[in-house]
């Protein structure tokens, strides 16, 4: 946790993510990444010079197999307010629309539901669990499938709804988060989506893993390139 916290604090300060009095909602999907973001921000809120509060939100997408009660117990331990928001996203995407490529529509609907829930809780900032590996995968997806240099940004202001998205885990590697999840025995909720491992992102991760056989630091190299350009929105303070 200390190593993760050091990464998170440096990221928060490099991109000026937190202001005095902020109320930040963590989007908790139940995966290891969002749980790590929740734990890290909850810990950071206890000693960070700028006082802020943390709340947690999970979206019930409509999969009966996904039980968020262990996440609720974790939030009790962390003394973080927690809310589960029921949605019809699974029904709309798979049963009504019968999307053959459901990821884009699902992601848009999840973002909208999460942002609305955050505003209802009085939070103008939403923290997501994207880490360094996610940034590199997104960059490679844009390069390979769209022919452009692009990636999400560490801080993204959504002017339509007035919510600012934060990605405080961007300096953390995925293997570090996996180690944290094992060490703390985080209550990971398995993703029940049938498209979870059948996507462009999953394919890009397979490509990156194959490249690691020749270049073990491939993720660090690509992430460094993103920072050195820098891509728009990646300028540090």
Image: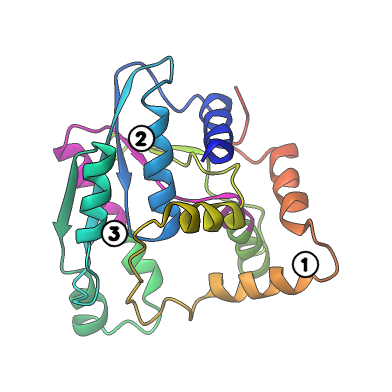
Report helix, strand or loop for mark 2. helix
Residue 226 figure quarter: top right
Q: Residues within 10 Å of mark 2 (few under 14, many from 20)?
A: many
The front one of 194 and 141 is 194
Q: Which residue: 19% across, 45% down?
A: 82
Q: Position of residue 114 (x, y in %)?
A: 25, 50
| Left or right: 221 in relation to 39 | right
What's the mark number on residue 212?
1
Count of all numbered marks drawn on residues in the image: 3
Q: Position of residue 157 (x, y in %)?
A: 40, 35
User: Which stretch is magenta?
Assistant: 110-136
Q: Is residue 193 above or below residue 57?
A: below
The front one of 71 and 125 is 71
2 vs 1, front mark? 2
Q: Residues within 10 Å of mark 1 (few under 14, many from 20)?
A: few
| Left or right: 194 in relation to 154 | left
- Distance between the Cα atoms at labels 2 and 1? 33 Å
Residue behind mark 3? 110
Q: Which residue: 33% across, 66% down?
A: 189
| Left or right: 105 in relation to 90 | right
- Distance between the Cα atoms at labels 1 and 3? 32 Å
């Amino acid at each position: 946790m200390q190593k993760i916290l050091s990464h998170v604090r440096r990221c928060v300060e490099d991109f000026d993510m937190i202001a005095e009095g902020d109320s930040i909602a963590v989007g908790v999907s139940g995966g290891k990444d969002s749980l790590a973001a929740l734990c890290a921000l909850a810990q950071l809120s206890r000693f960070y010079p700028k006082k802020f509060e943390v709340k947690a939100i999970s979206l019930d997408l409509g999969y009966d197999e996904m039980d968020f009660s262990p996440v609720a117990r974790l939030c009790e331990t962390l003394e973080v307010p927690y809310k589960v928001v029921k949605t019809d996203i699974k029904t709309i995407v798979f049963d009504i629309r019968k999307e053959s490529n459901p990821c884009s529509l699902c992601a848009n609907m999840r973002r909208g539901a999460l942002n609305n829930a955050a505003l209802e809780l009085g939070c103008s900032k939403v923290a997501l669990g994207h880490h360094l590996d996610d940034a590199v995968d997104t960059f490679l997806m844009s390069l390979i499938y769209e022919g452009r240099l692009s990636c999400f940004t560490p801080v993204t202001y959504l002017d339509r709804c007035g919510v600012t998205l934060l990605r405080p885990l961007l300096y953390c590697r995925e293997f570090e988060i996996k180690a944290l999840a094992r060490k703390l025995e985080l209550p990971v909720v398995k993703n029940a989506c049938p498209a979870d491992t059948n996507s462009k992102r999953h394919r890009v991760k397979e490509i990156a893993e194959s490249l690691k056989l020749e270049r073990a630091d491939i993720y660090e190299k690509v992430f460094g390139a993103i920072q050195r350009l820098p891509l728009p929105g990646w300028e540090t303070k």
